[in-house]
Amino acid sequence: MKHTLAELMNKSAKTLPPQRAGRSAFRLLLPLFLEMAERGHTASSMADFLVQEKEVAPERRLSACRSIRNLLARHAS
């Protein structure tokens, strides 16, 4: 190898764009979703709420529902 591991690490830190912090685009809304789930809402009703608030396009409702369901499953207590 031409470069040491430390040199490659330094170069990659400068050249690569920052990676996404979370796996879900809805991660920032997790506290809202957890509160809504506690009050008895389903992922489907949460997606409906996002469509109503124009945060999600109506044709992306099903995808949003799946994303919310997966996000809640990853953070289930």
Image: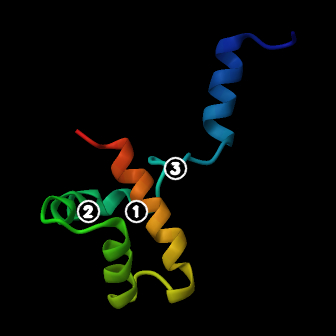
User: What is the C-alpha distance between the residues marked 1 and 3?
Assistant: 12 Å
Q: In the rendering, at what x and y percent does residue 57 appear?
A: 50, 86
Secondary structure under the numbered disc 2 in the rendered image: helix
Q: Say which residue label 1 marks.
A: 26
Tell me, for residue 20, which label it has, or none.
3
Q: In the rendering, at what x and y percent does residue 67 appear?
A: 47, 60
The residue carrying pointer 2 sits among few (fewer than 14), some (14 to 19) or many (20 or more) residues within 10 Å by Cα, namely: many
Which residue lies most toward the left here?
Answer: 39
Colour convention = rainbow
Q: Say which residue label 2 marks.
A: 33
User: What is the C-alpha distance between the residues marked 2 and 1?
Assistant: 9 Å
Q: In the figure, 73 relative to 24: above or below?
A: above
In the image, taking residue 64 as reference, residue 47 lies left or right, namely left
In the image, taking residue 53 as reference, residue 67 lies left or right, namely right
Q: In the figure, 11 relative to 4: above or below?
A: below
Q: Quadrant of the C terminus?
A: top left
